[in-house]
Image: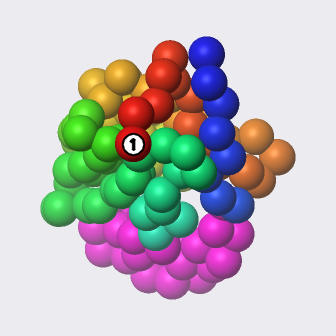
Amino acid sequence: MNRHRIADENREAEGLLPPARPDGSGIGVNYTDAWIKALNVEVEDGPRVSCKRKGLKIILQVGDQCGEAIMNRLAHGPDPRDILRHALESAAGQAGVRLLVEGGVIYLETERLEP
């Protein structure tokens, strides 16, 4: 299993969570958009990683592999952090990788990375 450091977790995104910043979406779209910006990188000696949100859908692409997941408030809410983490885990699984957050650092785990 290969483990690669992607980026530091965006701590400033915490300030975008309700009630500090009102969000009518119920899933924390402001928080989500700020947090996933860190996932748009090129892994050293590996593929490009990109992540975006379209409505309730999270789309994670690692090289030529892509995974999608719905941010489900009913199943994983009401905390937007939990909703996002579950969606990212599901999208990563579909892309054949794992995303981990440990000590404020985001890691990508995969069997093998191809540029």
Viewed as shown, does residue 41 lie left or right of 101? left
Q: Choose top left, top right, bottom left or bottom right for residue 89.
A: top left
Q: Nearer the viewer, residue 23 or 39?
A: 39
Q: Choose top left, top right, bottom left or bottom right for residue 93.
A: top left
Image quadrant for the N terminus? Answer: top right
At horizontal 32% and vertical 42% (from top left) the residue drawn is 63
- From this viewpoint, which residue is outermost toward the right? 103
At horizontal 55% and vertical 45% (from top left) the residue drawn is 45
Q: Tell me if residue 72 is in the magenta stretch.
A: no
Where 73 sits versus 20, above or below? above
Residue 42 location (% of width, % of height): 48, 57
Query: How many numbered marks does the figure carry?
Result: 1
- From this viewpoint, which residue is outermost toward the bottom? 21
Q: Tell me if residue 18 is in the magenta stretch.
A: yes
At horizontal 59% and vertical 73% (from top left) the residue drawn is 13
Name the residue tied to disc 1. Answer: 115
Say whether residue 18 is visible.
no
Q: Nearer the viewer, residue 65 or 68?
A: 65
Residue 21 location (% of width, % of height): 51, 83
Where 107 sits versus 23, above or below? above
Magenta residues span 9-35
Say whether residue 65 is visible.
yes
Question: Tag 1, which secondary structure?
Answer: loop
Residue 61 location (% of width, % of height): 30, 46
Picture colour scheme: rainbow
Viewed as shown, does residue 100 lie left or right of 35? right
Q: Nearer the viewer, residue 36 or 56?
A: 36
At horizontal 50% and vertical 17% (from top left) the residue drawn is 111
Q: Amino acid at mark 1?
A: Pro
Q: Choose top left, top right, bottom left or bottom right for residue 97.
A: top left
Viewed as shown, does residue 81 lie left or right of 74? right
